[in-house]
């Protein structure tokens, strides 16, 4: 407490000193301290709200001058500006967003009385009022509602704005609203500001869509992860995926290059078997094939052949050496065809036999 604050406190009556001490104790006991408006809340309802906050937050109502002294003693001058009208101090160890959400959820609709200022536009909705024909239709019209008698009752023909936000409620309007059961205001603790870890939060800062915020964070995290993976930037979260990706690429390269590795051999054998069956399926003369290949289905063989092509991905992936090897193979086949002159089927049978 500053020397100036001590001098101010020394001039206070004893009961006020004790009250300031209790307020100061509340401020020091919680991680977050805020100011709430309590205007228009009946005493009994305020007690119920204080009881509902038990375990989450503590509400203390006192004279404004004493609250100011306690806040100044604690160095919370930013909150002093919010001490106006009927207010109270609230302390909590919850984060400010949770506190704001809880206070907003606890608000309940309430009737508005003559002389009060409308917190928002007051609208009488279109529809049947449920009131029998009589002088009430005139009262509705006098406050600006488009009303008339139809089908044996008083009807409001369209949504009618009878008072704009910030204007004072008249006695006639208050009576009409009470008759219709319209409760245009919400009663509850109105959080004006809160300080947590030295940061001042206004209600506008705390009024967020939690689900939308969580969705935005999840989207950002997913995009960051994709960027890390595409850039091959290892982190604790992406290392397993990068390793799995590298393993898959290494295996694909090994299969494409026919590298005789122990882990690749089963796949290489399966690939070769599929290619062999695809080739056998193209032979019309079954007797030219060994017994185990004579019953190969053409469709199955073609599918296997397609699968084998998929391993190569595209014709562009072939190297020049592969092209030269293919050309040499074609030349050898032509030479053999010239020499054997029609005995190619039996030669193929010997090769498979």
Image (cartoon, grey):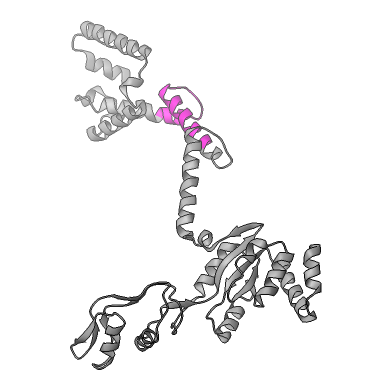
Q: Write down the quadrant of residue 82 in the picture.
A: bottom right
Magenta stretch contains residue 252: yes
Residue 60 left/right relative to 345: right
Q: Which residues are magenta?
A: 242-269
Q: Main secondary structure of the magenta part?
A: helix
- Within the image, what quadrant is residue 352 found in? top left
Q: In the image, is 137 to the left or to the right of 195?
A: left
Using the rendered view, name the quadrant where residue 314 is placed.
top left
| Percent position of residue 241, x then y | 51, 39
At a point 36% along the width and 14% down the height, the residue shown is: 322
Image quadrant in which the C terminus is located: top left
Q: Identify the residue at horizontal 52%, vertical 80% (top origin).
A: 40
Could one spot residue 130 in this view of the protein? no
Residue 242 % position (x, y): 52, 35
At horizontal 23% and vertical 5% (from top left) the residue drawn is: 339
Front residue (pair 192, 235): 192
Position of 248 relative to 124 (above/below): above
Q: Nearer the viewer, residue 6 or 319?
A: 6
Q: Is residue 136 left or right of residue 201?
A: left
User: Residue 202, position in %: x, y?
Assistant: 55, 61
149 drawn magenta: no
């Amino acid at each position: 407490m500053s020397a100036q604050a001590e001098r101010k406190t020394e001039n206070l009556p004893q009961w006020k000193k004790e009250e300031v001490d209790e307020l100061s104790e509340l401020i020091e006991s919680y991680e977050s301290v805020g100011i709430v408006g309590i205007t228009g809340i009946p005493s009994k309802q305020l007690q119920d709200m204080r009881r509902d906050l038990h375990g989450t937050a503590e509400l203390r109502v006192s004279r404004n001058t004493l609250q100011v002294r306690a806040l100044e003693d604690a160095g919370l001058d930013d909150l002093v500006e919010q001490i106006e009208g009927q207010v109270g101090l609230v302390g909590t160890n919850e984060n400010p967003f949770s506190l704001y959400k809880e206070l907003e959820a606890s608000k309940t609709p309430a009737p508005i009385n003559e002389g009060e200022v409308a917190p928002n536009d007051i609208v009488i909705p279109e529809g049947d009022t449920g009131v029998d024909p009589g002088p009430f239709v005139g009262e509705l019209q006098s406050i600006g509602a488009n009303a008339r008698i139809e089908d044996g009752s008083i009807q409001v023909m369209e949504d009618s704005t009878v008072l704009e936000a910030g204007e004072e409620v008249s006695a006639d309007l208050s009576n009409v609203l009470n008759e219709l059961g319209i409760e245009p205001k919400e009663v509850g603790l109105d959080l004006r500001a809160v300080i947590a870890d030295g940061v001042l939060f206004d209600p506008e800062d705390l009024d967020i869509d939690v689900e939308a915020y969580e969705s935005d964070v999840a989207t950002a995290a997913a995009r960051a992860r994709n960027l890390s993976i595409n850039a091959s930037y290892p982190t604790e979260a992406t290392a397993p995926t990068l390793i799995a990706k590298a393993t898959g690429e290494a295996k694909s390269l090994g299969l494409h290059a026919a590298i005789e590795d122990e882990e690749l051999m089963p796949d290489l054998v399966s690939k070769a078997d599929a290619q062999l069956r695809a080739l056998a399926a193209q032979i019309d003369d079954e007797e030219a094939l060994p017994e185990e290949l004579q019953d190969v289905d053409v469709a199955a063989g073609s599918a296997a052949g397609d699968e084998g092509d998929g391993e190569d991905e595209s014709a562009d992936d072939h190297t020049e050496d592969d092209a030269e090897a293919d050309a040499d193979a074609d030349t050898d086949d032509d030479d053999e065809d010239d020499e054997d002159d029609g005995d190619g089927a039996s030669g193929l049978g010997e090769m498979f036999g």
